[in-house]
Image: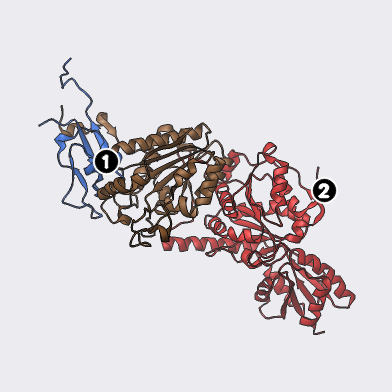
Amino acid sequence: MADTYTIISPENLVYKKTDLLLDNVMHYCPGCSHGTVHKLIAEVIDEMGIQESTIGIAPVGCSVLAYNYIDIDWQEAAHGRAPALATAVKRLMPDKIVFSYQGDGDLAAIGTAETIHACNRGENIVMVFINNGIYGMTGGQMAPTTLPGMPASTCPTGRDVKRDGNPLKITELLAQLPGTCFVTRHSVHTPGNVRKTKKALRKAFENQLANKGTSLVEVVSTCSSGWKMTPVQSNKWMEENMLPYYPLGDIKDE
Amino acid sequence: MAKAKGAIVVDTVTCKGCNICVSACPTQVIKLADQVNGKGYHYAYMANPDACTGCSNCAIMCPDTCITVYRVKQTSAEPTIH
Amino acid sequence: MRELKLMKGNEAIAQAAIRCGADGYFGYPITPQSEIMETLMAEAPWDTTGMVVLQAESEIASINMVYGGAGCGKKVMTSSSSPGISLMQEGLTYLAGSELPCVVVNVVRGGPGLGTIQPAQSDYFQAVKGGGHGDYKLITLAPASVQEMADFVEIAFDLAFKYRNPAMILSDGVIGQMMEKVELAEQKPRWTMEYIEKNHTWATTGKKKGQERRVITSVQLESSVQEEFNFKLQAKYREIEKNEVLYEKIMCDDAEYLFVAYGSSARICQKAIEIARSKGIKAGMLRPITLYPFPIQQLQELAKQVKGMLSVEMSAGQMVEDVRLAVNGKVPVEHYGRFGGTIHSPNEVVEALEQKLIGG
């Protein structure tokens, strides 16, 4: 057995940052789930060897600059329109791999129509859906997925379902559509969940290679700045509050 | 005390001190430093290197992917009982 | 072999799109232009040229599909009519902000609001002044015949790709719906991926080894960089204004009064010129073919010659502002036009000329 200094040598390397993640320091707040999911997508693209054929569609929201972090071609969409862009990119270049990366405001509020119709047409794309129940970029406003009673800057005393409506379980809704082949919900708040999320992402991309239709991977995520908690507290809060409403696991797998 | 089987290297420049690696480590290897990096974050470091098993939990959880993990493969230096 | 056919302006747009080698059309039905997508669907070009045709869930989705396709360096287009074009304004400013080429056809109907399905020319401002937010321009072509509906599709694509900017074909319900003979161009092949990769080095076609990744975006958080980008856009627009003005002069040589009219109003003014001349009024017409860039210089020249100009448009008076800016007070400039879906007659136009400018 060796001491720390002799362990740190190339032959013992078991985990390092994938080359597909660029060296740009992420603009995300400390502990933000976006970084973890970006990493997983980069690793999946790297491991599948599809860097040269993959085109990502970035949203509006905190991950508007996602294209600064993964070393592939990207298009940056208007708010909510990523599925429309992805539809055209895939239909015009069917041999490319296309995925959209969208937050809850983007995918489940302003872009609901584009989301539902892309899924309903069964566009052969991957949609990655980050659900942290809040608008992070604009400073913590209520999202379509904000939980009842959960405070946000536009519902400071908590979401009142009588006033604000109910949180939208859009993932369950999309699973109803015949165009989706794989609809699944994950999280990245524990190492085990990170591994499961990565597996789901890999499966989603493989589905596209197999021309199976739309795969949607929701990642229930944290927003420690918006939630006004530490990242570790956020993970705990998410587990106790978000996951009962947004239970993890496959909703549809055909 | 058990001898280390693993080790991590933290990119202290990129680390944002979010503490997620600290909570993810099953053997309490990592702590946040008293010092701060150029951005003012208390960066993560191996406070208890002997306990590191090289499991990579910290690294795969790290949102900024600033942890590299090493793990000793089984060697002849460690006798195996059959 | 060129073919001569009788068809609607809208059908001509569709036929021309296929024949010029367009890669994709994304649209949503709206009167009076639905024949464009109907013709494309009936022609099924995916079986012949490989062109993608898709009916989207909304104009918002259509224009964003255009954005996605244009970002791949493909020849993509959409069409709609006024209320639908209003919905597309967000997408258009993103396309301009990302410097993406595409063609958008607006077969204009009367507004505001849901308005009427009858023809109008009241979307002039929206087309030539930008339409969405931010400082940008759309290259705007105004066809006045079914033949021009067909011909302008390829011209619009050429200009769009030359300048990496959206181009609009600003038509109206008259030109879209009427039938005329049209000579269609020969079928051109679609661009190959090799051609696109070689010539559109900005397009997201997948990051090749040793190649920088390509990003299509309009976001720039650094205001000084965004200002620089705006300077670049403005320089591009000055180039377009210098190089791409298209117009037609009719009976201008001895003209004392000038109609300025585009699209179907220009057709009406041709008859009005005849009527005016039969009354001894030496009338002529400048027909802007590009509304942006606007034939400013030509109007300035004509202002030295004529006694007055009448901007004839099926609107409450939109292009008239640009005519006035161009002549800068040199001669009187008035507007005449019926609007809200009503079409002026040649006699009404001549009467307006007499009343507003000649003082008859």
- The answer to whether C324 appears left or right of A247 in the picture is right
Query: Residue sitting at 33 percent across and 35 percent down?
Result: A195
Q: Is residue C254 above or below residue C40?
A: below
Q: Secondary structure at mark 2?
A: strand
Inspect the image, locate mark 2, and give the three-letter code of the amino acid beneath it.
Answer: Lys
Q: Residue at x 30, y 39 (%)?
A: B60
Horizontal side, residue A234 vs residue C128: left or right: left
Percent across and percent down for residue C48 are: 70, 37
Q: Say which mark, if any, is on residue A140.
A: none
Chain the render paints blue:
B
Q: Are marks 1 and 2 on the same chain?
A: no
Q: Position of residue B16 (x, y in %)?
A: 26, 50
Q: Position of residue C68 (x, y in %)?
A: 55, 48
* Residue at which label 1 appears: B67
Residue furthest to the bottom in view is C359
Measure how far apart labels 1 and 2 are at the Cα level: 69 Å
Question: According to the rendering, which colour does chain C have?
Answer: red
Which of the two residues, A184 or A161, is positioned nearer the viewer here? A161
Q: State which chain is coloured brown.
A: A
Query: Mark 1 is on which residue type?
Result: Ile
Tell me if label 1 and label 2 are in contact, CB under 8 Å.
Answer: no
Pointer 2: what residue?
C5
